[in-house]
Image (tube, rainbow, N blue to C red):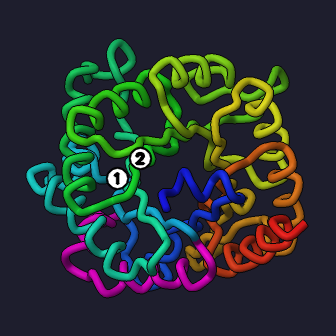
């Protein structure tokens, strides 16, 4: 059974936040998360397993910042294929039968011309190399995620398609403004959906920034514009920093999961968590999905 077959049967459960879980396992902020795929694979594996154990149908690889451009800030661009291949391989090593591994591809953190120095060709090449590593490591699908610029998302999509025949999903990140939901670069919901549909993306959606209550409204707006399967991965509210330097999020488990049934009702096909969520959130979401499947 493919992940597409599962989507036809019921809501698919993704995993939750990865970066916050890495930090809980001793990862020092400011260093490269993808390097832990080769230096501390047992820690990465443990996090993936905790999400599978909590009920995730699919986990996302530890490769969010694995494009050549993003890795260049750590002088690791030459290890792009190696680190992404390792990311997919590790997740597959703990994948139970009938579950899936998605290759995570986050933004470069840079801007395209004229706002920044990079050409579309340079972006495409950076994502192409990343997709090659994830594909060779046996990811079941790729997820181009947390995209705040539609132009970059399209570069990532085209670059990835040069290297793989895997299905490629895309999630955009929106802010809630008085006039509606827009990305940081001013892309509207309808513009994003129209362009991604034109490119033949089989699954699209949204993640990050918004909490689960805000995402209920956004998914409703997206469902009105498309019949494609929709991904929803909300943050656990807003982050805050304690005096000791610890990051915490404003939405606890119970408040977060209150909105999951409505998210499903409004048309989300795949649901997971983003920043601040952990296996406890996913376990509760798994219980809700089971109940909604029975009813």
Secondary structure beneath label 2: loop
Picture coordinates of residue 63 (x, y %)?
A: 34, 58
**Residue 108 shows up from this direction:** yes
Q: CB atoms at circles 1 and 2 under 8 Å apart? A: yes
The label number, if any, that marks residue 182 in the structure image: none
Picture coordinates of residue 85 (x, y %)?
A: 21, 62
Picture coordinates of residue 146 (x, y %)?
A: 52, 44
Going from N to C along the chain, the mark reached first, 1 or 2, is 1
Vertically, is 26 above or below 121?
A: below
Q: Main secondary structure of the magenta part?
A: helix
Residue under pointer 2: 106
The label number, if any, that marks residue 65 in the structure image: 1
- Quadrant of the drawing holding the C terminus: bottom right
Instruction: State which quadrant residue 197 falls in.
Output: top right
Residue at image position (49%, 24%) is 150
Vertically, is 224 above or below 129?
A: above
């Amino acid at each position: 059974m493919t992940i597409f077959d599962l989507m036809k049967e019921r809501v698919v459960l993704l995993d939750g936040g990865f970066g916050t879980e890495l930090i809980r396992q001793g990862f020092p902020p400011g260093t490269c998360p993808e390097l832990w795929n080769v230096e501390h694979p047992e820690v990465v594996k443990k996090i993936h397993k905790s999400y599978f154990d909590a009920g995730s149908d699919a986990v996302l690889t530890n490769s969010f910042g694995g494009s050549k451009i993003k890795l260049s800030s750590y002088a690791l661009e030459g290890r792009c294929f190696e680190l992404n291949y390792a990311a997919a391989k590790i997740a597959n090593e703990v994948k139970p039968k009938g579950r899936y591994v998605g290759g995570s591809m986050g933004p470069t953190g840079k801007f395209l011309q004229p706002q920044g120095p990079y050409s579309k060709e340079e972006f495409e090449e950076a994502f192409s190399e990343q997709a090659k590593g994830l594909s060779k490591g046996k990811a079941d699908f790729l997820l181009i995620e947390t995209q705040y610029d539609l132009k970059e998302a399209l570069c990532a999509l085209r670059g990835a398609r040069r290297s793989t025949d895997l299905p490629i999903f895309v999630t955009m990140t929106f802010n809630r403004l008085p006039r509606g939901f827009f990305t940081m670069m001013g892309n509207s919901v309808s513009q994003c959906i129209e362009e991604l549909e034109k490119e033949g993306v089989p699954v699209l959606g949204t993640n990050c920034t918004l909490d689960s209550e805000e995402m209920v409204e956004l998914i409703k707006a997206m469902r009105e514009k498309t019949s494609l399967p929709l991904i929803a991965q909300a943050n656990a509210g807003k982050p805050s920093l304690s005096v000791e330097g610890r990051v915490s999020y404003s939405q606890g488990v119970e408040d977060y999961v209150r909105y999951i049934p409505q998210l499903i009702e409004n048309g989300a096909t795949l649901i997971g968590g983003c920043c601040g969520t952990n296996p406890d959130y996913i376990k509760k979401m798994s219980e809700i999905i089971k109940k909604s499947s029975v009813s």
